Amino acid sequence: MAVLNELEPKEVFRFFEEISAIPRGSRDTKRISDYLVAFAKERDLKVIQDEVNNVIIFQPGTPGYEESEPVILQGHMDMVCEKTSESTHDFENDGLELYVEDGFLKAKDTTLGGDDGVAVAMALALLDSREIPHPPIEAVFTVDEELGMEGAEAIDLTVLKGKKLINLDSEEEKTLTVGCAGGVRYQGLIPVEKETASGDEIKITIQGLLGGHSGEEIHRQRGNANKMMARLLYHIAEEKSYRLSEIYGGSKDNVIAMEAHASLVAAPEDTEQILAMIRNMEDVWNAEFMGEEPGLTVKTETEKNTDTVVFSKDTTQKVVGYLKASPNGLKEYSRKVAGATETSLNLGVVSMKENGVEAAFLIRSAVDSRKQQVLEEVDAVTKAFGGTGTISSAYQAWQYKPKSELRPVMIEAYKEIYGKEPEICIIHGGLECGIFLGKRPDLDCVSCGPDVLDIHSYNERLDIASTQRSWEFLKLVLKNCK
């Protein structure tokens, strides 16, 4: 049963609800891609679906706009799949459970997929309409943006005739985005030697953190569960001897880790003191966060007198030391734009591999040399603890263009809708415009979108009133692109 029937704009929320019923996590985009192809064919629109499931839909201009230059609308199909620890939601098989609360659209105990489902929904609403005036539209829907712009890397843009590109992947209504940081992924692996040890096994879980987008939220200095676990384990090791048997945390390198787990084996006579140290560290964190991580909890379970496969003493020291020493978070503010983040990195995932413990980082910077500097810092730390590193998914920054035909059109439309000037900004999160410009340097790109809060976390929510205003703004922009 539809739950968004009464929301405005009806045409946008109709399609948002339809795509929310389709599982569409990164690397699971075939179903949503096929849905888009079927949508186009049902309306006799030209459509291209490539081998990685990117889709481009073409719609002619409305009467009076037939000969206008096409406008490219762009968003990505995939969403970040995060859920609460109690949720039983299956992202591979279940649609999202949408609901409305306090003027926001949310999904029960999971991410909403407003990033970037709202772009898909708006583009579909335009393609479905025969009444909204607009030039020819070339609607580009990419896959696997959340994994490093993989769809954008693979797509063939030579089929596009338009030069004006409106990216609908921004999450702040007050801004028009004209540039973004570049990024690179790094995976560090610390080899693990194992042995058997006897003692009390203490299982530690840090959970309930706010998390969020590792680019857009990194400046808020939210708790990173992986770094917090490393700090706790390092602190315990200063006073008590133990062996790690397991450590893992986070789910994606572009999400600030909300949860982390570790198991250690210690002498029975040290158990109570270790548990007291854990409780004390929870109090320390609550004092440090000053109420900004209200859901933070640290849970423990103890199993007495076990024989367990554990890391060797040397390996335990190296793994804990590596995670403690690895840089994380905000590194540099912009020297040109006050308050803007220039360079950061996120230790998003710690995982157990067959041959060691892996730490996955996403490094971002608007300055390529700074990005390289941080990459070298992480690699140096990895090597210092006897590990090896691999690099993947490097993508370039979107450099600001001083001259633009599209930007003035959008600024004037914004002033007409909102009665004020928009903020023109360069963001720290990644957008596909940089990759598109690498393929087509003639493109004139601007990004916009409604307010979507706490993206990449199960607190994600879409502002309904903002969506209505953003829809009116987009329609006016297209009307003025004659």
Image (spheres, rainbow, N blue to C red):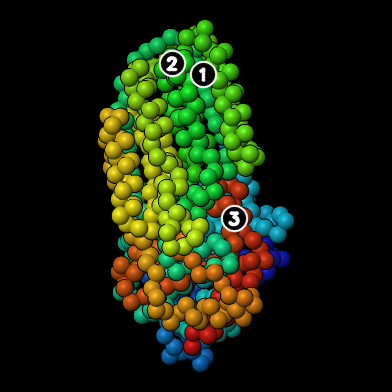
In this orientation, does residue 56 appear?
no
- CB under 8 Å between discs 1 and 3: no
Q: Give the residue number, with chain letter if any, for mark 1.
A: 202
Q: Quadrant of residue 68?
A: bottom left
| Residue 201 placement (x, y as % from top left) | 49, 16
Q: Quadrant of residue 83?
A: top right
CA separation in Å, label 3 and label 2: 41 Å
Q: Give the residue number, with chain letter if any, for mark 3.
A: 453
Disc 3 marks a residue whose amino acid type is Leu
Disc 2 marks a residue whose amino acid type is Tyr
Identify the residue at horizontal 34%, vertical 52% (top origin): 371
Q: Give the residue number, with chain letter if any, for mark 2.
A: 242
Identify the residue at horizontal 51%, vertical 10% (top origin): 270
| Residue 210 placement (x, y as % from top left) | 58, 43
Which image quarter is the N terminus in? Answer: bottom right
In this orientation, does residue 307 appear?
yes
Identify the residue at horizontal 42%, vertical 31% (top origin): 324
Q: Give the class, few, some or many, for how many residues have Cα within 10 Å of label 1's Cα (few <14, many ≥20).
A: many
- CB under 8 Å between discs 2 and 1: yes
Residue 320's label in the rendered image is none
Disc 1 marks a residue whose amino acid type is Ile
| Residue 335 placement (x, y as % from top left) | 42, 59
